[in-house]
Amino acid sequence: MCVQKGIALSGYVSDGFIGSYQKLITDTVIPYQYDILNDRKEGAEKSHAVQNFINAADVLKGGNGNDGFYGMVFQDSDVGKWIEAAAYSLINSPDKELEAAADRLIDIIAAAQDTDGYLNTRFTVTDKDKRWTNLLEAHELYCAGHLMEGACAYYEAVGKDKFLKVMLKNAEHIYRHFITEGHEGYPGHPEIELALMRMYRTTGDSRCLELAKHFIDTRGVDPYFYAKEKEKRNWTVWGNDPYNFDYQQNGRPVRELSDATGHAVRAVYLYTGMADLAALTRDTELFAACRRLWESITGKRMYITGGIGTTVQGEAFTADYDLPPDTAYAETCASVGLMFFAAKMLENEINGEYADIMERAFYNTVLAGMQLDGKRFFYVNPLECVPGISGVSPTHRHDLTARPGWYACACCPPNVARLIGSFGKYAYGENRDTAFCHLYAGGTVSFENGVRLECKTAFPYGFDVDYNIISGGRIAVRIPSWSRDFSLTLNGEKINAVPEKGYVYLDARNGDRITLRLDDSVRVIYPSPKIASLSGRAALMRGALVYCFEGVDNDGDVLSLSLAEKGEAVPCRAEGLPEDVTALSVECLRSSDSGSLYTDVPPTLTKIKATAVPYYTWANRGVNQMRVFIGR
């Protein structure tokens, strides 16, 4: 078992590629998102999230709530995620001004809490009598979960417990409603399960653990709960179908689940809570269910980019091998959640495949969810984009050609911010006698088991990883499955080691230097023939990065490109992208266009040098075509 560590350690990730992204989060993303949450950013979708808390406090004092509640029913969650992102920034880069801003925001949240511990602006500003009557749609537990995570992170970052006490009081209220008073139900949108597990670890309050277990254990035992709930009320948020068991992952008890179904974010948030509980309680039956769900996702229902969720209809998984690139949903939040799930699976068993998927999701879909300048965001991450069709055709309207500045449903932008800020939590882990290096991130790492090391690497573009051991012990270094060859040296002497489930274990002493050299070759990736929409196509990867072809580099046309047989692909630069981004010069064939919709004249094939860029960098140089899988 491996316990993920790192978010409470100063200087955890401080340089290299990840360090530069964390600096972007600190310097640009957090201030930008704070202005949006306070409705101070012109041209961006209105949030009103902070004002909702102010208005809720006004109602509790007997006022009229000023201008009322505005936004999605889960608007509170954006504030919780922002505080969590700010907390990680304060760990990495202490800043009194940011801390003061977070303190002021926490004061605003605290003032919006009712005397009984209830905390939700939507049902405090309006419809107080409707609290806890629509678990299917109302997201009260979802919002509470994100606020709890923010409270835990802030306490871990700066040691202030005001927000933590607020959310513990809220957890007590929820415990009283569902456990003490015995009200039926479980979350419509899972999230609080994993948050309560974190609250338990942070506070030691056993009620948080009991409540998390209760929500997991009761889910699906009565699959008709939501239908019965709906019969008792005369109002709805979206008109969700209470009988859509797949969408809500509630058709059967969670220990009986086998296939990843329904809303992809809800699914992986639920699975994360399940895996976390399984690891803590050594519940082998629950872990077995998690393993089946993991295999369903990664073996049959995941895009090459680590994106999950095939269809816009329900933002959901569909069927095995149904992975069309041009209508992909692949929500940014879903890949964030997939990383959460993978990290908790690592706590159940040390297996490099979990870290492989964490890495794939992060360096491709998660990073693609944010513009390189940190000010625009994708909710949906297609693998193919054609201006005039994408964002226009009814079947492709969700697949945009450019990132918006914000969203009415703004779950993804703060999710990306908090995940990048806490990257060390996923890069490193430990148990009593071993320090695990899951992902490659520059910086100094101190483990609670006494190991301390400094990592130096230019990954994902550099393929050497150096570990300078400051305080020795047993260290496990991951060897990714994509690296066909690797070399590992200890103080310059080669180590002939066979990885155990993806890890090489070393006993290192103070002053030792471990160097890992990974395979930097370009790989042609062939999709399973079962993926009908990708027949005859292939993609390119180098290391963890999936590459795509953009029109801006290729005379505006990537649809006529195909890979030349045995063609070379070599590193190069791409105009308009940062200098540290490595593109690929690829030998391709371009098919001529007859000008006819259909013709019996075969096209002329011309050998050319095309340019491919890392998928996460696409849509940063204007609106143009993009394709991950091209003909072969």
Image (spheres, rainbow, N blue to C red):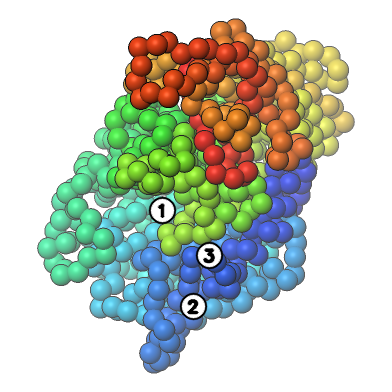
Q: Amino acid at mark 2?
A: Gln
User: Which disc number belongs to residue 325?
Assistant: none
Comparing marks 3 and 1, which lies closer to the viewer?
3
> Crowdedness of circle 1 by 10 Å Cα count: few (<14), some, many (20+)?
many
Q: Nearer the viewer, residue 297 or 180?
A: 297
Position in image of residue 310 (x %, y %): 36, 37
User: Which disc number belongs to residue 191?
Assistant: 1
- Asked whether the residues under the numbered discs 2 and 3 touch, taking CB atoms below 8 Å apart as contact, a structural biologist would say no
Comparing marks 2 and 1, which lies closer to the viewer?
2
Identify the residue at the far top of this view. 566
Residue 53, visible in the rendered structure:
yes
Residue displayed at 87% across by 31% down: 511
Q: Is residue 330 left or right of residue 566?
A: left
Q: Nearer the viewer, residue 611 or 313?
A: 611
Q: Amino acid at mark 3?
A: Ala
Cα–Cα gap, marks 2 and 1 = 24 Å
Q: Is residue 495 above or below residue 558?
A: above
Give the mark, 3 or 1, whose residue is nearer the N terminus.
3
Residue displayed at 28% across by 78% down: 127
Cα–Cα gap, marks 3 and 1 = 27 Å
User: Which disc number belongs to residue 51?
Assistant: 2
- Asked whether the residues under the numbered discs 2 and 1 touch, taking CB atoms below 8 Å apart as contact, a structural biologist would say no
